[in-house]
Image (cartoon, grey):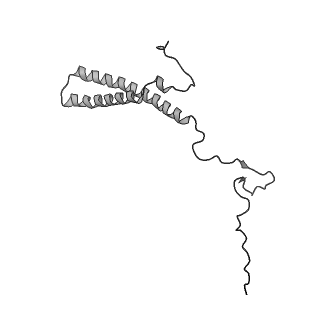
Amino acid sequence: MRGRMSIRMNEDLDPNEGPGLGCFTVQAVLFALILLFIPIGVFSLSWPVWLLTAMLVVAIILLFFISMTSVFLLRVFFAARRTGRGRTYGATAPPMTIESGASDTDAPRSDSQPTDPPTDPPTDPPTDQS
């Protein structure tokens, strides 16, 4: 039953089952050419009205297919970007801890911040060399 359409809910999209980038490109170029030739046919070439109407109907149908193809390609693209990757925006911050004995004036501190200011390593006292 390959010819029958199936409704898939919450499944990964198969890029091989839908239209590709070449199909989208052909549709978009054809749509742009038709949109270019409609005003040229009206103002410069004086084409008959039935031909211009047919071109407009074809342009509207192409616009529908272009939108469906672009939605499919965007869903495939972003689904491929989501798989196999975790967080994408920086490292995860450690959870903030609040001490229960702290007063109201103390601000909560994160575990990643040191409690004491950093100190310089001890230096040797100067020695007399006399």
Determine the image quadrant of residue 25.
top left
Position of 2 with respect to 85 (left or right) is: left
In percent of the image, x 28 and y 21: which residue is there? 54
In percent of the image, x 32 and y 30: which residue is there? 29
| Residue 108 spot, x, y in % from top left | 72, 53
| Residue 98 spot, x, y in % from top left | 75, 50
In percent of the image, x 55 and y 35: which residue is there? 82
| Residue 113 spot, x, y in % from top left | 69, 56
Q: Nearer the viewer, residue 118 or 105?
A: 118
Quadrant of the snapshot with the C terminus: bottom right
Q: Nearer the viewer, residue 9 or 56?
A: 9
* Outermost residue to the left: 45
| Residue 63 spot, x, y in % from top left | 37, 27
Determine the image quadrant of residue 64.
top left
* Outermost residue to the right: 101
Q: Nearer the viewer, residue 12 or 28?
A: 12
